[in-house]
Amino acid sequence: MIIPYESDYFPEGDNFLVELGRFVLISIRNSGRGVLLTLDAFLFFPLFYRRRHELLRQMFLVSIKSLGVVSLVALFTGMILSLQAGLTLRDYGQEMRVGTVVAESMFREMGPFMTALILAACVGSAMAAELGTMIVSEEVSALEVMSINPVYYLVMPRVLGMLIMCPALTIYTNIIGVLGGGAVAYSQLNVEWQVYYDYATMYLDMKEINVGILKSAIFAIIVSGVGCYQGLATSGGAVGVGTATRRAVVISFLLIITSGYFITRMFY
């Protein structure tokens, strides 16, 4: 299943406007192909049990293999939020409210955002590189010769594994970030743990938690869909694999940032 990234339908031009239009048309065309590929993977979700071993492997790669990096980033994200917000609040004698700032920031925005960026860099790039190598070595063509659908065999376990584990990792990130913020509040701002906990949970309602989980699910689809599409659109040998990996990370980062803004704007 070789997906061409460029298209002869949009020939190169000799001026800036023609090149800009060509870039826009190619981007739209590739975006549509990526969306259709991801939707095809969703259609195979009811058959996940047949690929349960690969699904479990993908879940392991997304969760356990990324747990160390996620833990470290989550801890220091909460610590930085607590320190920066606490120093500002201390000028007004309100440093005890730092728990509210850290908890709402982590659950609403920073937790899903940082988790998705880490998974895009660690797992999304690996998906693109792995599938791109299979394209270059013609393993995907061999699957098609054996009448095995590459979307069912390769893409579906990766999308579903990411969709299951990304929200779970986001919840873990939120908890670690709040704990890291509490450690800084206690050691640097002289805020007692009980006071920090009370303010962290006082204004945190289910809306912040649900929106964060929704964001993480959408980010999971973005990371896995972009990684799989870029991998299957690889061409040009080893150089093409590197290009596909770089595109997967860059495009995932941009989509995570922009979609995160619009989701926040929609709910708040």
Image (cartoon, rainbow, N blue to C red):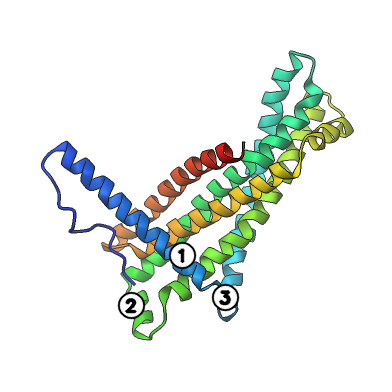
Percent from the top left, x then y, of residue 210? 68, 48
Q: Is residue 11 left or right of residue 197?
A: left
Disc 3 element: helix
Q: Which mark is residue 46?
A: 3
Q: Is residue 185 above or below residue 245?
A: above
Mark 3 vs mark 2: which is more N-terminal? 3
Q: Mark 3, residues whose alpha carbon is within 10 Å: few (<14), some, or many (≥20)?
A: few
Between the residue at mark 3 and the residue at mark 2, the CA separation in whole angstroms equals: 25 Å
Instruction: Please say if the residues under marks 1 and 3 sit with CB atoms less than 8 Å apart.
Output: no
Residue type for callout 2: Ser
Spot the residue most to the bottom.
146
Residue depicted at 45% across the width and 56% down the height: 125
Q: Is residue 94 above or below residue 56?
A: above
Is residue 230 visible in this depiction of the protein? no
Q: Which mark is residue 39?
A: 1
- Corner quadrant of residue 188: top right
Residue depicted at 22% across the width and 44% down the height: 21
Residue type for callout 1: Leu
Closer to us: 141 or 210: 210
Residue type for callout 3: Pro
Percent from the top left, x then y, of residue 8? 18, 59
Badge 2 is on which residue?
Answer: 141
Residue depicted at 46% across the width and 64% down the height: 39
Q: Mark 2, residues whose alpha carbon is within 10 Å: few (<14), some, or many (≥20)?
A: some
- Corner quadrant of residue 237: bottom left
Q: Is residue 23 above or below residue 80?
A: below
Q: Which mark is residue 129?
A: none
Between the residue at mark 2 and the residue at mark 1, the CA separation in whole angstroms equals: 21 Å
Disc 2 element: helix
Q: Is residue 61 left or right of residue 92?
A: left
Quarter of the image where the C terminus is located = top right
